[in-house]
Image: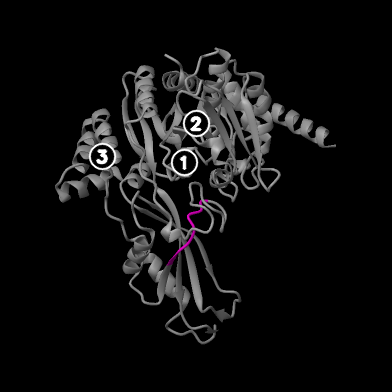
Amino acid sequence: MGKLRGCAIVVCAAGLAARAGAQASPEPTAALLTELIRVNTSNPPGNEAGIAMLLAPRFKALGFEVDIVRTPDSAKAHFIARLRGDGSKRPVLLAAHADVVGVEREKWTTEPFAGVVVDGRVFGRGAIDFKGGMAVFARAVLMLAEKKVPLSRDVIFVAEADEEGGRYGVNWLARDHWPKIDAEFALNEGGWIMKRADGRVRYVSISTADKSSVTYTVTATGTSTHASMPLPDNAIFRLSRAMAKLADYETPVSLTASTRQFFAALGKTSAPSMAQHFRDLLADDPTLVRRADIEISKDPLLHALVRNTIAPVMLNAGFRSNVIPGSADATINARLLPGVDRAAFARELERVMGDSMVHVRVGSNAPGAVGAPAAGAPPAGTPAAAAPASLPSSENTELYQALVKSARVQWPEAEVTPYLFQAGTDAGAWRSRGVPVYGIYPYPIDADELSRMHGNDERVSVESLKQGTEMIFRVLMEVAGKR
């Protein structure tokens, strides 16, 4: 019955693809991406072991040493493939997470797990985040073996579990299997290759650090009593007033070295009016900075790059309709700039809310389910407030320089810049151990395609996948090929 049911799903997906006007893709990276999308790895529950089963025979056939690391959850597994070099240099690692977020199926114009190609674009959950990157990284690594390139170092490809949330992500893998993924430097998701309206690439950003994702619990307390006799210290009202103050609070602009370089690059590639705002943001004059911030922050991505951000995500209060509760909680997801102390930021939030009966507790830094370790989190048992901050990766490594060089070859008209990634990745598993990690979504996309990441009708162009594969293959030739 299992096989018949699986066949029925494939037939159904094929029918939907046909109705959507889908085409088969002769481009190898796009073809691989369609197959990856068809393995539904929505997390929860994940099912990343399905990706391992899909990839294993392809890598084994080309001489890779393949290791499927099973987790205590049988549906979750990490896939590791190593192509041996002569060992004269330490390995280079390419990591891509196999899990994806869920979907609102009724809001898609195609079946989100059919992996269809329509009008030159691959549609499906994970097309951008991050099965598209997995397809690019995998094809570039496989090409080394297909072309029998002599290597000076091992090349390691990793397809990971539980990046979007869960307990068996790369921190679990690094804790128990570190020798399998130890490397001189690593490539992961992160920076963007952004296109102009006319399709030309505007800039290539390579992330050297991530903002950290930290969960805070805001608790307001009051007197619990019968709902017919309300008192002035109602916990829900108190929490509401405190949250209203946070809603009106804008954290100050704070630029890192990489964001300064990034905005300088935008100043060179933007229309005159916006170019001036980007230059003003870098000025020493607080008035110019404030004015520039107002204009630049109309773009949510740019707004997030220049400050710590605060986002309420859950509320919890009460247990009966006729009882005023003694406490009310709000859960806040904060994205903090590198070097920001988590406990100190909690105190900042308390100062803004200004109520001695409202307290902020530092929780986990989990992006997924409550209690699940975050991507890039410290080992289990490390207090969140004391979790070590990983330093930005150096721009003076062979891998970073190869990324810059290859990007300039691929898109000569584009600015190439380091970048602070506005969200979180699992790079901390390596950075916290001293391994430099560089992040890139290795395909040109436009603003509309970016907005569909984690959204509806996620998609990436076949041509972008082809260009990204060419770029990453050159990078691997540069850092791992014998000269």
Dot 1 surroundings within 10 Å: few (below 14), some, or many (20 or more)?
many
| For the residues bearing labels 2 and 1, Cβ distance under 8 angstroms | yes
Q: Which mark is on residue 430? A: 1
Badge 3 density bin: few <14, some 14–19, many ≥20, Cα 10 Å: many
Q: Residues within 10 Å of mark 2 (few under 14, many from 20)?
A: many
Q: Earlier in the sequence, mark 2 or mark 3?
A: 2
Disc on the earlier residue, 2 or 1: 2
Q: How many marks?
A: 3
Q: How far apart are marks 2 and 3 (CA)?
A: 28 Å
Which of the two labelled residues, at mark 3 and mark 1, occupies the earlier sequence position? 3
Q: Is residue 436 magenta?
A: no
Quadrant in which the N terminus is drawn: top right
Q: Please report contact status of discs 2 and 3: CB closer than 8 Å, yes or no.
A: no
Residue 97 visible, this orientation = no
Amino acid, disc 1: Trp
Front tag of 3 and 1: 1
**Magenta stretch bounds:** 361-367
Majority SS type along the magenta span? loop
Q: Can residue 15 be seen in this view?
A: yes
Q: Relative to 154, is 308 above or below?
A: below
CA distance separating discs 2 and 1? 10 Å
Above or below, 11 against 234 in this view is above
Q: Mark 3 points at which residue?
A: 260
Q: Position of residue 433 (x, y in %)?
A: 44, 43
Q: Quadrant of residue 110?
A: top right
Q: Residue at x 67, y 38 (%)?
A: 49
**Residue that label 2 marks:** 93
